[in-house]
């Protein structure tokens, strides 16, 4: 039996092994805006905020819509779109709202859905019912 060695090349833009959290401007809680040097963009803690206020009185579906709009704004400011999103983590305080939240999610990602994990949470910042984290490809 012959043994073969597999050779892999590492892309020029591979993630750096050192990841240091950096503070962002006007962030809520302990959320930073970027971690390390990478070929991926990590956007975390997108709350259903409008004009600096968490819209906690809105339905979970409407809150997700605000959070996704905020995510889209964050991406657009960096020359990216929702199509660049590879993965989303959705934190939801009311799992009974899953279906209505899912309908909102499907409207934003029409053809190809990013990988998604939905996590039930007891409580979120500002009394929000939802918050999202996203990973987007830079290229």
Image (cartoon, rainbow, N blue to C red):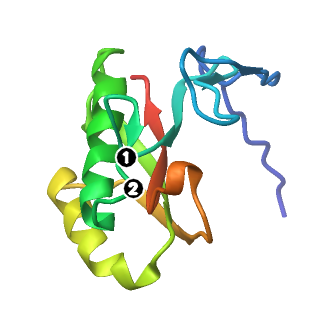
Give the alpha-carbon distance from disc 1 to disc 2, as whole Å: 8 Å
- Residue contact at pointers 1 and 2, CB within 8 angstroms: yes
Q: Position of residue 135 (x, y in %)?
A: 49, 40
**Mark carried by residue 20:** none
Q: Is residue 110 in view?
A: no
Local SS, label 2: loop
Which residue is painted at 84% across and 53% down in the image?
3
How many numbered markers are drawn?
Answer: 2
Q: Position of residue 136 (x, y in %)?
A: 44, 35
- Residue with the mark numbered 2: 56
**Mark carried by residue 48:** 1
Q: Is residue 61 in view?
A: yes
Q: Position of residue 55 (x, y in %)?
A: 35, 49
Say whether residue 97 is left or right of residue 9.
Answer: left
Could you say which is closer to the camera, residue 94 or residue 38?
94
Residue most toward the bottom?
A: 96
Which residue is painted at 54% across and 23% down in the image?
39
Which residue is painted at 73% across and 41% down in the image?
6
Q: Compared to 132, does 33 lie above or below? A: above
Q: Position of residue 4 (x, y in %)?
A: 78, 48
Where, by quadrant of the figure, is residue 57 drawn?
A: bottom left
Local SS, label 1: loop
Foreground tag (1 vs 2):
2
Could you say which is closer to the camera, residue 111 or residue 126?
126
Quadrant the C terminus occupies = top left
**Residue neighbourhood size for the residue with mark 1, other residues' Cα within 10 Å, grouped as few (<14), some (14–19), many (≥20):** many
Q: Compared to 90, does 42 lie above or below? A: above
Which residue is painted at 66% across and 17% down in the image?
37
Say whether residue 112 is left or right of residue 20.
Answer: left
Could you say which is closer to the camera, residue 74 or residue 11?
74
């Amino acid at each position: 039996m012959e043994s073969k060695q597999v050779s892999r090349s590492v892309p020029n833009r591979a993630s750096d092994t050192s990841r240091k959290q950096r503070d962002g401007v006007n962030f809520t809680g302990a959320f930073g805006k970027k971690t390390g040097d990478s070929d991926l963009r990590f956007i975390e803690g997108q709350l259903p905020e409008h004009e600096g206020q968490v819209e906690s009185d809105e339905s979970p579906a409407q809150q997700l819509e605000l959070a996704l709009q905020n995510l889209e704004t964050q991406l657009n400011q960096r020359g990216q779109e929702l199509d660049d999103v590879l993965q989303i983590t959705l934190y939801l305080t009311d799992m009974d709202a899953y279906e209505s939240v899912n309908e909102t999610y499907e409207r934003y990602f029409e053809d190809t859905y990013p990988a998604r994990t939905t996590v039930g949470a007891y409580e979120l910042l500002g009394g929000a019912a939802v918050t999202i984290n996203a990973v987007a490809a830079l290229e």
